[in-house]
Image (spheres, rainbow, N blue to C red):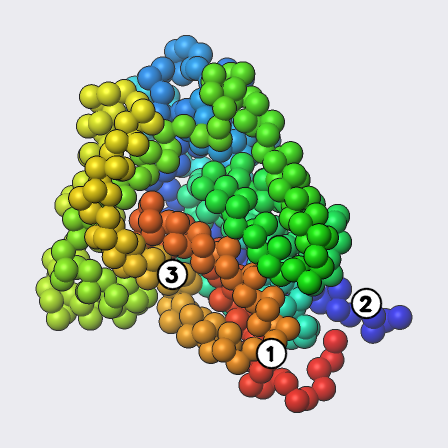
Amino acid sequence: MRSSLIGPYHRVVFALIIFATLATAILLRTPKWLSDFDQSFYITIAYDLIHHGVFSNGVFDKVDSTRETPPPGRFFAPVYPSLVAALMIIDPRFARAADCNVESNAGLRSGSQCEVYARPAHLANAVFLTLGVLAVALTAELIVGVTAAFWLAGIFATVALLSDADLFSFVMTESITFGVYSVALLAFVWSLKAPALGRFLLAGALLGLLVLTRTSYVVLFFVVPVLIVIAMRQSGLKALGYAAGFVIACATVVSPWMARNAVSVGHWGLTEEYGSATLIERFAFNDMTTREFFLSFAYCLPTIGPPVVEMTFGTQAMDRFVYHTPRSFFHVGRSMRDKLVEAHGRLDPLIGGIVREEMRRNRWRHLLVSLSLGWCGMWVGGSLGLLLIPAFVVGFLMARDSTLRLLSFYSVPAFAMLGLHALIANQYTRYNLILIGPLAAGAASLVITIFVRGRTVVR
């Protein structure tokens, strides 16, 4: 009896250690002003939810919500701003800090009056990251079929996330996206390994929640059903039933938000303006020179790339790749977007023509630049990425048939999102943290293939 409980007890202790490690790393980071980076996007919407009962577009509408009720909006997905609002209700100190930030941005008070405090959000980030790590560990165990994969993948994923501890000290969506995605893919792999309609329904519902967390993941609504049909093709019509169940479950979760948008905003659809704004900013990268293109493959290697390139080609060689430099691709793209908004008010009616013209002039350049951005966005996990990515490739090549099959289906959605972000967004690894799951599972598979296979594995 006692031995059968050792595994579960050890896993609970492991989860607590992961949470403590991640939470400590986040809380030790320098406190961030709540107006820094993208935090005010979500905090302003949370403010409007609490004070006006309206899910607005936050800083992207023309109404000062400290003085009047803003109109309903759908620029951002609903889950994270709603979570921030819930945390503000739970912790009045966080609510005061957030309210002060919004009022400071509106010119009602000085920012020096505002406390820098977001501990509830930081702890929530640690919870979602821990949930994601456990999901990655369990998925690796399902894929490799060995208990050791759970511990190895969990450790790899935790260390990889620690490299972005500063990112997680912001009130932003990266942590919850990683957590929800990892759980959704755990359900997906579980469904493939032990097919049952209820499991595919669960995976679809979790993907729906992910789409309501970050709208770009709607692309997986089309990718994953295809993977289900391919993976379950020997089941004949049952495979189509599983895929249909997945789609229906996902649509069931997402459709209330779309219905709300139709009623409150006047348009069906998951979002507005966000995709157009992101794509316009992405087009700025198409101005990349041939020199910058080739240097990017060295420059984007974590830790070693930037100093080597700067020492060899000069400190200004890759300035346009860096977010905070005045001449960066990001700032050029943001300026283009702002000018279009100022001139026309809305981007969605314009984006079709803008895309057609850009593709007419720069179709092949856009695809080539996307190779560079995809390469740069792939190196998640900081310095550990230098080990994880090669280990994933070798582990993939050495995997047994059953492991290879599940690892392939586990990896495709994350790499599909990597490609999407390269095509329509930018090179920042924060958009591709979901790669940590497949990389950790592949690295765990390699370690087990080398050191554990052929021995008796205690399960």
Q: Are marks 1 and 3 in contact (CB under 8 Å)?
A: no
Between the residue at mark 1 and the residue at mark 2, the CA separation in whole angstroms equals: 30 Å
Q: Are marks 2 and 3 in contact (CB under 8 Å)?
A: no
The residue depicted at 31 percent of the width and 24 percent of the height is 349
Say left or right for 149 vs 294: right
What residue is pinned by disc 3?
378
**Kind of element beneath mark 1:** loop
Looking at the image, can residue 379 be seen? yes
What residue is pinned by disc 1?
400
The percent position of residue 365, horizontal first and vertical second, equals 21, 52
What residue is pinned by disc 2?
5
The residue depicted at 54 percent of the width and 66 percent of the height is 408
Between the residue at mark 2 and the residue at mark 3, the CA separation in whole angstroms equals: 39 Å
**Kind of element beneath mark 3:** loop
Identified by mark 2, the residue type is Leu
Question: Compared to 214, does 459 lie above or below?
Answer: below
Between the residue at mark 1 and the residue at mark 3, the CA separation in whole angstroms equals: 25 Å
